[in-house]
Image: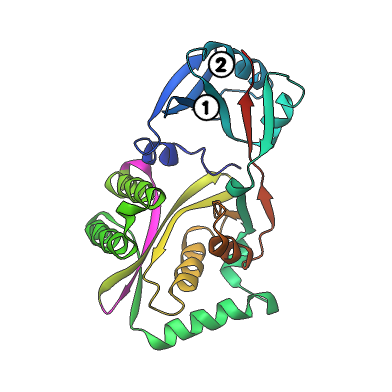
Amino acid sequence: MVSEYTFSNLFAWRHAYEFCLSRIDEALLVVSCQGGALSIFDPLMPSGPGKRRIALAAARAAGGFKNVRFIRLPEDTALSLRQEKAFVLEEDADQFDYVYRAKDLVALQGAAYDGKRNFIRRFKDNYDYEFLSLRKENLKDCFYFEEEWCQAKDCQRAEGLEKERQAMHQMLEHFEQLGIRGAMLRIQGKVEAVTLGEPLNPQTFVVHIEKANGRFTGIYQAINQMFCEQAARDYQFINREQDLGIAGLRKAKQSYHPAFLVKKYTATVTQR
């Protein structure tokens, strides 16, 4: 259920976080080494019961690093480490994933979604738009949109936005090979919004990227609903990832009334 654990996501963010791979027995470890610290994702392995043993082995093996931690751990792995003195366990609330019922985001029914439907109605009434699936022949337009969006947001001065720009570029460059699904909104022939996602598990679709030109009223609500209807209506849930502790983003994600949050944890190694 954790949004980070798709091949496409790890591949797209590999440069931003300097990912490398390591093995311990039957487990594959995705590791980030930045600033002298070692950050390790949840051990990827055929079955779950051995994760506690693998985590302890990885902690012992990382003796050359001053700071070692396991990040974005799902709750089952975190609970398996709770009694281990080698780790200090903390909830990472800024990284909790927001998960919604797909039927809610597609239909937007009921009083709770009155505001969303009004924004979409205003968008459709006010703009000459096209909603299009991403395909090989229109990907170039998405690159142009991303560059314009980043210039407007001054991505080069914001580390998080610059890393996201790199990840989106990777998803678009390898769109067909990764099997990602995507859509765009054109207004008067120009791309003004792009979204990208993929299946996370058999019941859940995850939306990795959603960017739009905010000067068009209702554009975010419109592309959200249209993409969910097109790409995710046959799934039970839609994971729209985390809010990163950003107040405005948290408010926006809460306004869609999540069915539940996927909790994530950090386990910091205290002794090896």
Q: Residue at x 50, y 23 (%)?
A: 29
Q: Position of residue 101 (x, y in %)?
A: 64, 59
Q: How many marks?
A: 2
Q: Is residue 42 visible?
A: no
**In front of the other: 64 or 168:** 64
Q: Label 1 sits on what residue type?
A: Ile
Q: Residue at x 32, y 41 (%)?
A: 177
Mark 1 surroundings: few (<14), some (14-19) or many (≥20) residues within 10 A:
many
Which part of the image, by quadrant, shows the C terminus? top right
Dots 2, 1 in contact, CB < 8 A = yes
Q: Residue at x 43, y 74 (%)?
A: 219
Q: Is residue 2 magenta?
A: no
Which residue is under mark 1? 40
Q: Secondary structure at mark 2?
A: helix
First reached walking from the N terminus: tag 2 or tag 1: 1
Left or right? Give the position of 50 relative to 62.
Answer: right
The residues colored magenta run 177-188
- Locate residue 217: give its quadrant: bottom left
Which residue is under mark 2? 58
Q: Position of residue 132 (x, y in %)?
A: 35, 67
Q: Position of residue 120 (x, y in %)?
A: 50, 79
View extreme (right): residue: 83
Q: Label 2 sits on what residue type?
A: Ala
Left or right? Give the position of 18 relative to 222.
Answer: left
Q: Residue at x 50, y 21 (%)?
A: 28
Q: Is residue 123 visible?
A: yes
**In front of the other: 93 or 10:** 93
- Locate residue 90: give its quadrant: top right
Q: Secondary structure at mark 1?
A: strand
Q: Position of residue 220 (x, y in %)?
A: 46, 70
Return the mark for residue 191: none
Which part of the image, by quadrant, shows the N terminus? top right
